[in-house]
Image (cartoon, rainbow, N blue to C red):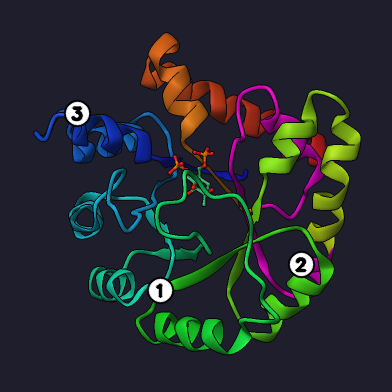
């Protein structure tokens, strides 16, 4: 089954808004695992308005599943992950101050820089993933720099899902086939939710992991965290059955 990594940025955002440790990110992360999540994702940005850099080592210390740390590979970000050694680091080409992630890397134009960073991650025993749009040239660039995985930026899929889901998923399904043929592992995320998740998973049989935060934490306001995680896991199961 496709693994669910719960992105806790929005939990950290609430914590940070009052300057104390409530809600406690570590407790929420441990509870997500207890409720069935197979991983935890955080995306510390330079202003640390969401997850903070010091959350990385603290989470790595207590998690029993996988920690995925996403972010722009500034030297500060790299020092933090190389020290804490999460299971996976997902490189994202965000500008400082960006509202949220909205595009993937140019793996061809920035190949030298990305190759060096991926090499540093590999030497530290960290699995690398890079955030990409579903473009065959970008995937060939990703394979050439020897990243372990790619993460498809699914914002456009989510945006177009309600009007024409077959057209919305088609570029991702094609890109997934190409990535698998190139030997790349495949993750996906951004704006996935209870409505659009199962169909996406059903159309991408090679998908390994989704990271979901904004919608999942919002749903938890209504259903509670435990029920919400069960709902997302059931969508992943349903999608997985459709993919078989
Ligand atoms: C790379 C990606 O898509 C996620 O990490 C996303 O950026 C998280 O979103 P927020 O931090 O805006 O909740
Ligand atoms: N990598 C995507 C992620 O972690 C969560 O994105 P979103 O569900 O908060 O849009």
How far apart are the two marked residues, 3 and 1, measured between alpha carbons?
29 Å
Q: Is residue 39 left or right of residue 150?
A: left
Q: From the image, which quarter does the C terminus lie in?
A: top right
Which element carries disc 1, helix, strand or loop?
A: loop
Residue 13 x, y percent position in the rendering: 29, 35
**In the shown orientation, is residue 181 left or right of residue 236?**
right
The spot of residue 202 in percent (x, y) is 78, 38
**Residue at image coords 77%, 66%:** 180
Cβ of mark 3 under 8 A from ligand 1: no
Residue 188 included in the magenta stretch of the image: yes
Dot placed on the residue nearer the N-terminal end, 3 or 2: 3
Give the label on residue 126, or none: 1
Point out the residue furthest to the front here. Answer: 97
Answer with mark 3 or mark 1, whichever residue precedes in sequence: 3
Q: Where is residue 162, by image quadrant?
A: top right
Q: Is residue 124 visible?
A: yes
What stretch of residues is rendered in magenta?
Answer: 178-207
- Could you tell me which residue is drawn at 26 percent across and 29 percent down? 14
Coordinates of residue 226 in the picture (x, y in percent): 38, 21
Residue at the disc numbered 3:
23
Is the residue under label 1 in contact with that under label 3 (CB below 8 Å)? no
Q: Is residue 154 magenta?
A: no
Q: Please name the residue that numbered disc 2 is placed on.
A: 179
Mark 2 surroundings: few (<14), some (14-19) or many (≥20) residues within 10 A: many
Q: Nearer the viewer, residue 90 or 37?
A: 90
């Amino acid at each position: 089954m496709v693994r669910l990594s719960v992105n806790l940025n929005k939990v950290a955002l609430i914590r940070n808004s009052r300057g104390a440790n409530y809600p406690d990110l570590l407790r929420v992360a441990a509870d997500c695992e207890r409720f069935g999540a197979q991983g935890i994702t955080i995306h510390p940005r330079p202003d640390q308005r969401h997850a903070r850099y010091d959350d990385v080592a603290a989470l790595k210390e207590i998690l029993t599943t996988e920690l995925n740390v996403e972010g722009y590979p500034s030297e500060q970000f790299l020092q933090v992950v190389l020290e804490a050694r999460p299971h996976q680091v997902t490189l994202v080409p965000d500008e400082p101050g960006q509202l949220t992630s909205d595009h993937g890397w140019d793996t061809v134009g920035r190949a030298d820089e990305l190759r060096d960073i991926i090499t540093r991650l590999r030497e530290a025993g960290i699995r690398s993933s890079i955030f990409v749009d579903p473009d065959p040239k970008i995937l060939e660039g990703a394979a050439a720099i020897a990243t372990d995985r790619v993460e498809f930026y699914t914002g456009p899929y989510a945006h177009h899902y309600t009007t024409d889901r077959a057209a919305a998923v088609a570029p991702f399904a094609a890109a997934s086939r190409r990535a698998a043929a190139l030997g790349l592992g495949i993750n996906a995320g951004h704006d996935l939710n209870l409505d659009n998740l199962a169909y996406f998973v059903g159309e991408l049989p090679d998908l390994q992991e989704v990271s979901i935060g904004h919608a999942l934490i919002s749903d938890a306001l209504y259903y509670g965290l435990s029920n919400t995680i069960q709902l997302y896991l059931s969508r992943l199961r349903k999608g997985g059955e459709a993919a078989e």
